[in-house]
Amino acid sequence: MPIGRLLIANRGEIALRVFRTCRLLGIETAAVAAPDDLGSLHARSADRTVEITSYLHTEEHVRAASRAGADAVHPGYGFLAENGDFAEAVEAAGLTWVGPSPEALRLGGDKLAAKRIARDAGVPVLPDGTPDEIGFPLLVKAAAGGGGRGMRVVRSRLELDDALAAAEREAVGAFGDGTLYCERYVERPRHVEVQLLADAHGTVVAVGERDCSVQRRHQKVLEESPAPRLGEGLRTAMLDAAVAFGAAIGYRGAGTVEFVVDGEEFFFLELNGRIQVEHPVTEAVTGLDLVERQIRVAEGERLVTTCYESHGHAVEARLYAEDPGTFLPQAGRIERLRLPSDNLLQGRAARVRVDAGVEEGDEVGIAYDPLIAKLIAHGRDRDAALDTLSAALAETEVAGVTTNLPFLRWLVSHPVVRAGEATTAFLTEHTPLSVAPLRFAPAPWRHPWRLNLPAPPPSPPPDVDLESHRHGATHEESTVVSPMPGTVIRVEVEAGAEVTARQPLVVLEAMKMEIPVHAPYAGVVTLVHVAAGDRVAGGALLVELESY
């Protein structure tokens, strides 16, 4: 049944992205906005905007759809996009749900159930179980989680209890479900995901793959398609495995099956039952509009083909309001915003696309994701795409709020990235904004080696936070300040307490993530200036210390 007016139950860049396709299809748009978000770009851009009290309340979106006269709901990504109860409530209200069925969302969203289904479908999975069964290092994960929330790497039994407690708090805050599980942790894998499309008639198709290995705190920062340095046999096996999993849960719409790749082995990670932030790189190489495909499937159409061709190469970088060295979110008003355009590509066999969520003059706060824009470059090959992205980043200007733009420029020029050899450990092994080697040696000589001796076992990636404390702290420091705006959720010390270097003093929450603030050196706490529940600005005084 054709959709006449679509409500997007989300905000920011993804809402604007869905609006764009709706206008091409002649579908009217309705936006929702929380009270502190009524002045945002997405709220100003829809045909109709309805105020809601919270983006997290399912009933608010259903009521908003009724008030706006919408006959369908698109969840975007994040918030309620993978919530089976929300999908069920939308359908129960007689609205068209642009997404997977509630049953598929529940099966895919429960990470433990998804692993069982994958295993039964013949898809390789990482071992899970108790810490004693798995051993260390292991990964604590939220069963209902995603996006890196409720996730902790644990390297020893001494770290386990604190990691479990922190992951549970974070999972409850982000997903309302504190169920956790543990699985084997692979130190230096690649993160490769397969884009699925499926209709309501049983057809499930893989639309290529993306490499999303460059991450910080399990959050992706650079994505590309197709995945570099991936053998055809391995690529085909992963695409087939993703289709098998999608068919096993009765998937419908657009979704992503994520894998970790370790050498020539790959393992199922999770299903993301929604459109992904990085979907534009797949659109660039296939020529598809994935949001249009979502809408057409929701309207009951069949997929017209089971084979999609890929042309050229595409790379995406995420421009955030965050510190370029620490990745801590920042807030402020955007006083100047100059984003790249295809004008910079004259004479190049490439193009650039920008998906922005804000305009000049908009405020970036601490309540929501600090994404400013996504820059997507498409070229005839990988080198052309990376060169184009580098030129696009050089043309980009942002003033009024701190951004990760210097980091992105550094990242795209780094020889390891340019060689297509980045793993998920890249940003722990290469300190952001550090000087990259002038020369990049041939592949056999890029790693430590010994003549006539067996290779030593691989060591874990270095602890970047520890190194920064070692080299950055001095005994002249007497105060600890907030590295960003946020809310104090816990104070771990009191006046008079003796602390060791890197001991957590205060735990902040920002962007639904727990961020501990550590002691820069061993000493005695002289004053504590905050309490749980306090909202603090970046640079606010938290704790005073006296060093030994």
Image (cartoon, rainbow, N blue to C red):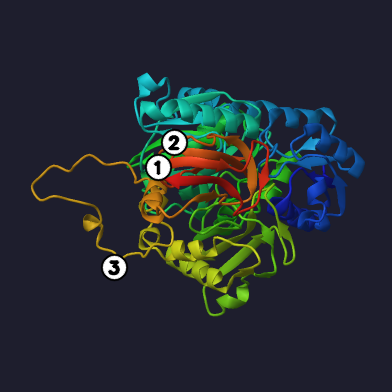
For marks 1 and 3 on the same chain, the one whose residue lies earlier in the sequence: 3
Identify the image quadrant of the N terminus: top right
Lateral position of residue 1 relative to residue 130, left or right: right
Left or right: 441, with 1 as reference point: left
In the rendered structure, which amino acid carries the disc numbered 1?
Answer: Ala
Along the viewing direction, whichever of 422 and 470 lies nearer the viewer:
470
Please report contact status of discs 2 and 1: CB closer than 8 Å, yes or no: yes
Mark 2 or mark 3, whichever is nearer to me: 2
Q: Which residue is mark 2?
A: 498
Residue 318 percent across, percent down from the top left? 57, 57
Q: Position of residue 529 (x, y in %)?
A: 61, 43
Residue linked to disc 1: 522
Rendered location of residue 372, percent (x, y): 65, 58
SS label for mark 3: loop
Q: Based on the displayed image, in which of its 4 quarters is residue 54 positioned?
A: top right
Cα distance in 3D space between marks 2 and 1: 8 Å
Verify CB contact (< 8 Å) between mark 1 and mark 3: no
Q: CA distance from mark 2 to mark 3?
A: 47 Å
Q: Nearer the viewer, mark 1 or mark 3?
A: 1
Quadrant of residue 68 in the image? top right
Mark earlier in primary sequence (2, 1): 2
Kindly identify the residue that appears in the image at 66 percent across and 53 percent down: 289
Disc 2 residue crowd, few under 14, some 14–19, many 20+, Cα 10 Å: some
Mark 1 Cα shell of 10 Å, populated few (<14), some (14-19), many (≥20): some
Is the residue 406 above or below the residue 29 in the image? below
User: Helix or strand or loop: what does disc 1 sit on?
Assistant: loop
Q: With respect to residue 272, does 160 lie above or below? A: above
Q: Is residue 545 visible?
A: yes
Task: Name the amino acid type tagged 2.
Answer: Glu
> Which comes sooner in the sequence, label 2 or label 3?
3
Residue in the picture at 83% in, 36% down: 60
Tag of residue 439 = 3
